[in-house]
Image (cartoon, rainbow, N blue to C red):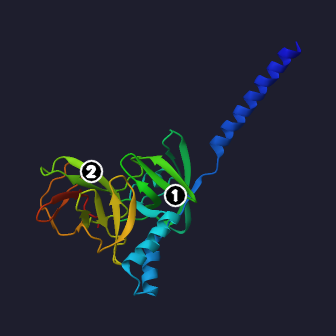
Amino acid sequence: MPESRSLIFFIFALFILSGHQSIKAQTRKPFTIKSSSVAKALYEKKQKNPRISQAALAAFGNTLIKKNGLDFYSDNCAIAKANKKEESGFSEELTTFNFEVEDLGGKNIPFQLFTNDWSAACGCSFDFPLLAINEKDWTILAGNTPVKLKRTPDIDFEEVRLLDKTKKKILRRWFKPLDNEPEGISADGTKIYVSLAYDEDPGLFLEISGNGTFQIVPRNTPNIIKTSTKVVNFDGGSDGFDALKQFKTKTKSYYLNYLYPCT
């Protein structure tokens, strides 16, 4: 009899504990997302020290990325809609956006983003401080915590595609932080180069690898093919990838396909 009571008590205690753990999982505090502002910090560094070398400025920027991530822009309005906010909105006060993204283990991870301006020429504008991004997953810096997440159509990023010589087959994909054009490709065709800002040019490129990692490099980095011509009247099909650049040397040729920047 005492053994039966002990067994019942053990099962009851296990039930209570498992229920308590479930409640904690459902109500845990969300990760807070903060803008990294790396491009702004680079511009200010260059303004204070105009003679700083490109290599030193790039090293400074990469240190910031490791610490704060790099802002990648998404114009998808799914987050605004989920929080019952107007698309492409603005507020005099900080507005809170709550959302969840599934991690690689299938668990929904809660996030919280604060902004007073999510307006954009096309859709919305939300910045995510990333450490890496590829076709399958992306690593976001939430506070001081790197969190690896599954890609979701509700948060999409600007894409660049490498096409074959027929301009029909996709050989490789990269994802870039801004709605701008690729400005270079590595001689071996594995990396692309884009500007870090729309207007200020600190003499740097963001080098993006096919595996989703990225780093800041000087614009005079060797083995970058920068000479390009735009292919006119290219039809990218239903997904709208109608912009095409051919990067060419005497011995090599690469076609980079992307969306036209939204104006």
Q: Is residue 178 left or right of residue 20?
A: left
The amino acid marked with disc number 1 is Leu
Q: In this figure, which residue is indicated by the disc labeled 1?
A: 141
Label 2 neighbour load within 10 Å: few <14, some 14-19, many 20+: some
Q: Position of residue 236 (x, y in %)?
A: 19, 52
Query: Could you tell me which secondary element the residue under label 2 belongs to?
Result: strand
- Decide which of 170, 232 is in the foreground and name it: 170
Q: In this figure, which residue is indicated by the disc labeled 2?
A: 172
- Decide which of 132, 197 is in the foreground and name it: 132
Label 1 neighbour load within 10 Å: few <14, some 14-19, many 20+: many
CA distance separating discs 2 and 1: 25 Å
Q: Answer with the quarter of the image where residue 76 lies.
A: bottom left
Q: Residue furthest right?
A: 2
- What residue is shown at x 38% (from left), y 58% (from top)? 75
Query: Could you tell me which secondary element the residue under label 1 belongs to?
Result: strand
- What residue is shown at x 29% (from left), y 59% (from top)? 191
Q: How many marks?
A: 2
Q: 45 above or below 165? A: below
- Decide which of 15, 191 is in the foreground and name it: 191
Q: 6 above or below 117? A: above
Q: Position of residue 210 (x, y in %)?
A: 32, 54
- The N terminus lies in quadrant: top right
The amino acid marked with disc number 2 is Arg
Q: Position of residue 153 (x, y in %)?
A: 39, 47
Numbered circle sitting on residue 119: none
Q: Is residue 35 left or right of residue 164?
A: right
Marks 2 and 1 in Cβ contact (< 8 Å): no
